[in-house]
Amino acid sequence: MARPEARSPISVVLLYLALALSVNAADSAEVLAVDLSDAITPASVELIRQSIESAGETNASVLLLLLDTPGGGLTETLEIVSLLERSEVLAVGYVSPSGAKAWSAGTLILMSCDIAAMAPGTIIGSAQPVRLTPTGSTEPVNDSKTNNAIIALIEEKARLHGRNVTAARQFVQSNLNLNAETALEQGVIELVAESQEDLLRQLDGRTAGNRTLSTAGAEISQFQPDIRLQVLQVLADPMIAGLLVLIGLYALIFGLSNPGHGAEVFGVIALALGLIGQGFDVNLGALFLIVLGMGLILAELHAHSLGLLGLAGIICIIAGTALFAPVSFPQWYLPANYQRSVMGMFLVPSVLLAGFFAWSVFKVAQARLRPPFQDQVASTAIAMQRLNPRGFVLFQGEYWEAESEGLVEKGESVAVLERKDRMLKVRRIG
């Protein structure tokens, strides 16, 4: 029986070095940073959802929420809080840079993070809910049912993370505002950090969520939203969404009262995009746009709109495809390694289909702009082969079957006399 070879001292040392390096690589933390700025909208919910999924796929140990927001919708805020609760990735809320604020909804999100931090010169607070008035201004919500529910929620978040419950209650009851230093003194946050690098140094060795962080020198990668989310972020801007709905309604009214100008089609498109921006289900809205686009293209094939319906249909299909792309894959029950393949399988046929429709609409519009055939009689064509008496000619860039009155050699010019179905009657010139 062969005796196993003895390991040399050098191989043993190399083995230990490899093991040590692998352990260090496993302990090194990757931090995924996501910007949660401006108003909290339906796009913000999708942003947090995608960033949590991305952090899980890349095995990031920390999701760093960079907060700078005046607040936003209560429904969207509660969805974000719920996402953070269910996330297996440690969430660190960081109000930054200096001069930033996390008011209202931003404060509630910060209190829901596993670790709360602020940069010097930042403010949190003013968490009493408000509502829009018919004049466009805001007024505090004094409904005890709503206020008590929010107070109970923010108190529970503060208690769960070992923070000042009284101050958390005052954020809602009295619109309390705190700067970074005061918030740290009162136990509302855990850290005050000058920069993201300073924050990672202070996080190193801390325990949160039954985990000890190792973030010193960790790499910070910025989450990049996909095209679907970028479009949704534009549509979700309160001013843009409201403007789209307003324009859509007026265009729809004008189009229905004065048909034939295409205003009603534009109104439906603008209204659908505005409703998506205001929180209407994105996938349903995108599906509606795709179906509407196909309907408009079919209508273009039977109407005389000089391509306007077809152009509107192509725009609908492109916008619907961009919004409908299955980017949030867990709700589609697909493993991560199939995500890009499915994206390609979905987008490539959609782009090809839109291209085909665009080509079809162009050809139809081109045909309609062409003068009637009787106006083209006596035009000339070129014989592409010998006509004796039949063959093919090139007429206005298209191949036609032709029948001549006499022998015509290849390359000679002929005069078009008439058309019978798909056959041209021609005569040799000269």
Image (spheres, rainbow, N blue to C red):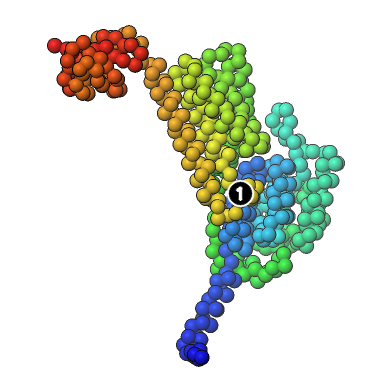
* Residue 5, image x, y percentages: 48, 89
Relative to 326, is 182 above or below? below
Residue at 63% x, 22% y: name it: 249
Q: Which quadrant holds residue 190?
A: bottom right
Amino acid type at mark 1 = Phe
Residue 68 visible? The answer is: no
Q: Which residue is mark 1?
A: 329
Q: Which quadrant holds residue 410?
A: top left
**Front residue of 120 and 245:** 245
* Residue 61, image x, y percentages: 62, 63
Relative to 107, is 414 above or below? above
Q: Indicate left or right for 388 with 424 as reference.
A: left
Residue at 46% x, 29% y: name it: 357
Residue at 60% x, 54% y: name it: 335
Where disc 1 sits, the SS reads: helix
Q: Indicate left or right for 214 with 347 as reference.
A: right
Residue at 31% x, 8% y: name it: 375
